[in-house]
């Protein structure tokens, strides 16, 4: 239900996440190699952001 709502509110971002791409820059994410630590990996699980977008976002 919530997923359906998100698709309506953020259609492009949700589509990218579904394809394994960063919702912000559209980069294809290689989950095994992209992230420098477990914290970043966990954040990816929540937001779908790649490492460099997380760096931009949190710094
Ligand atoms: Zn990104």
Image (cartoon, grey):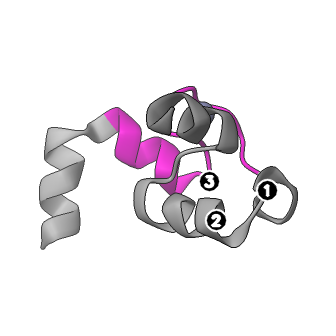
Which residues, given as a range, are shown in magenta?
A: 12-29
Residue 36 position within the rendered picture, expressed as x and y whole percent measured from the top left? 79, 56
Question: Which residue bears the numbered disc 2?
Answer: 41
Q: Residues within 10 Å of mark 3 (few under 14, many from 20)?
A: some
- Horizontal side, residue 15 vs residue 33: left or right: left
Q: Is residue 28 above or below residue 3?
A: above
Question: Which residue bears the numbered disc 1?
Answer: 36
* 44 vs 28, nearest the viewer: 44
Q: Is residue 52 above or below residue 48?
A: above
Question: Which residue bears the numbered disc 3?
Answer: 20
Task: Tell me the tag on residue 15.
Answer: none
Single out the residue that lies furthest toward the right: 33
- Horizontal side, residue 16 vs residue 7: left or right: right
Q: What residue do we see at 23% from left, 65% from top?
A: 3
Q: What residue do we see at 62% from left, 59% from top?
A: 40
Which of the two discs, 2 and 1, labels the residue nearer the N terminus? 1
Q: What residue do we see at 43% from left, 45% from top?
A: 15
* 7 vs 54, nearest the viewer: 54
Kind of element beneath mark 3: loop
């Amino acid at each position: 239900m919530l997923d359906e709502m998100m698709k309506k509110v953020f259609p492009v971002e949700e589509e990218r996440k579904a394809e394994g791409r960063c919702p912000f820059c559209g980069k294809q994410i290689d989950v095994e190699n992209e992230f420098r630590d477990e914290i970043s990996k966990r954040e990816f699980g929540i937001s779908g952001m790649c490492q460099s977008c997380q760096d931009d976002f949190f710094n």
